[in-house]
Image (cartoon, grey):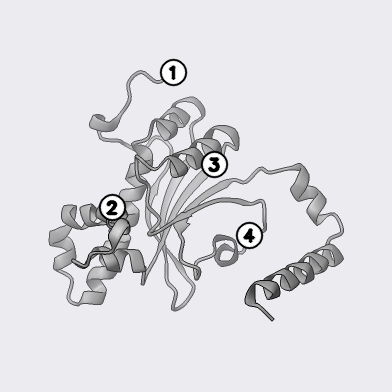
Amino acid sequence: MDPYAKLLIENKAWAKEKVMDDPDFFNRLVNIQHPEFLWIGCSDSRVPANEITGTAPGEIFVHRNIANMVVHTDLNLLSVLQYAVEVLKVKHIIVCGHYGCGGVKAAMTRHNFGIINKWLRNIKDVYRIHRVEIDSQPSEDDKTDKLIELNVVEQVHNLVKTSIVQQAWKTRQGPDIHGWVYRLSDGIIKPVLEMPYGSGIDNLYAFDDLV
């Protein structure tokens, strides 16, 4: 059996099981979507948002990319962010990285990865900003872990720099923003930064003409 065919069989089994446990499960999903959370996570297949948080379909609106980045020129990310904040009116935005992230590891090298270099440069910029703190770590693994944590911190700040978040903070006092790191070896999430509504923002990035 081809691997993709197995996925289709598993899908049918999953759907049948859901209906057996809860006959109205899919009707609810079709008719409503009111997630409280936007999850910005890594594309890594080992970090599925719903599974590691124990949430059901419909509870988390998810965007994933390499190394859970918030890049100000990424229209995909910005479109997801705007929809989640302005239409779904999520109460929380979570940026979740993970230890052992391949994207972060790649950004710490001088290898040429082709077109992905353009993406990794954003992570290299985080390394450059925090070079002293990262290079002071006792081992290469510790350096990588520190950059993974600091990358999450920077992406949280990048969210606050957007007019989308600033407008929401001004008009509806939310959402709160959380920076987390997931550890593959034990399945536990470590919070590294919390920025609730109204947290300070560098005036350089603050928009003064929002209505």
Residue highlighted by disc 1 = 211
- Name the residue furthest bottom: 1
Element under disc 1? loop
Q: Is residue 5 left or right of residue 174?
A: right
Query: Closer to the N terminus: mark 4 or mark 2?
Result: 4
Gap in angstroms between the C-alphas marked 2 and 3: 32 Å
Q: Which mark is residue 55?
A: 4
Relative image position of residue 30 (x, y in whole percent): 76, 46
Gap in angstroms between the C-alphas marked 1 and 3: 20 Å
Q: Which mark is residue 118?
A: 2
Query: Closer to the N terminus: mark 1 or mark 2?
Result: 2
Closer to the camera: disc 4 or disc 2? 2
Residue 56 in which image quadrant: bottom right
Q: Give the residue type at disc 2.
A: Lys
Residue highlighted by disc 3 = 91
Gap in angstroms between the C-alphas marked 1 and 2: 35 Å
Closer to the camera: disc 2 or disc 3? 2
Residue 36 in which image quadrant: top right
Gap in angstroms between the C-alphas marked 4 and 2: 34 Å
